[in-house]
Image (tube, coloured by chain):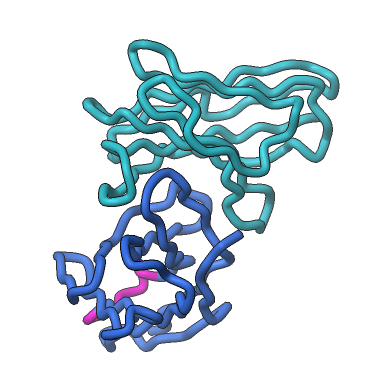
Amino acid sequence: DSGVTQTPKHLITATGQRVTLRCSPRSGDLSVYWYQQSLDQGLQFLIQYYNGEERAKGNILERFSAQQFPDLHSELNLSSLELGDSALYFCASSAGGGRTEAFFGQGTRLTVV
Amino acid sequence: DAKTTQPPSMDCAEGRAANLPCNHSTISGNEYVYWYRQIHSQGPQYIIHGLKNNETNEMASLIITEDRKSSTLILPHATLRDTAVYYCIVRVNNDMRFGAGTRLTVKP
């Protein structure tokens, strides 16, 4: 158990819909990362937050947005969903900075039908 | 864009040491080398990290060359459960981007 909790574990929704994925970081971790992993593909970095502020942005689509709340949990919002958005979405947390290791949750498997 | 280069796949016999190489020729002085692995579709698992000295923990050893342009992750006694995709990344602050990794297959 990494200490990072992601909910829900599985999500099935229709094209055009909007969903919210939730991530609770390890206790004390200030940094949260989001990744997308399509079937048999690599981990695509989406976005990172540190203590409520956006710190780094990767290949995140404009239809996607994220935020980190004062209690440090984070949400990834995916809207106008397309079939190609079907993927595993992982959240990771770390204490912050490049000197600290990150720990990953078990992911949310999103299926768009 | 990942800053590392790894072989796409490797095999290792069970019980033998697995040596996974990584090239990071453009690494800067304050960037750390990190290794993670992903077993099937589980969340990636942290293994080890280092700056310039060799590091060892209960899972593995990390050997970083003196010029820091490459490193090797060593699993001393590979088991079937070590079959996974192994990722080498370099980072200093916020960015944590993964490349394609090396798919290690441990064979009986």
Residue B87 location (% of width, % of height): 45, 65
* Chain letter corresponding to the colour cyan: A
Give the answer, above or below, for where B51 lies relative to A62. Answer: below
Tell which of B87 and B32 is nearer to you.
Answer: B32
Left or right? Give the position of B23 relative to B58: right
At a point 45% along the width and 28% down the height, the residue shown is A6
Q: Position of residue A54 (x, y in %)?
A: 50, 27
Residue B75 picture quarter: bottom left
Above-or-below relation of B86 to B93: below
A106 vs A18, nearest the viewer: A18
Q: Which residues are magenta?
A: B76-82
Residue occupying image coordinates x 26% and y 51%: A99
Please count the marks in the image: 0
Is B40 drawn above or below residue B93 in the view shown? Answer: below
Of all residues shown, which one is farthest toward the front? B29
Q: Position of residue B100 (x, y in %)?
A: 58, 66
In the rendered structure, does residue B89 fall within the stretch colored magenta?
Answer: no
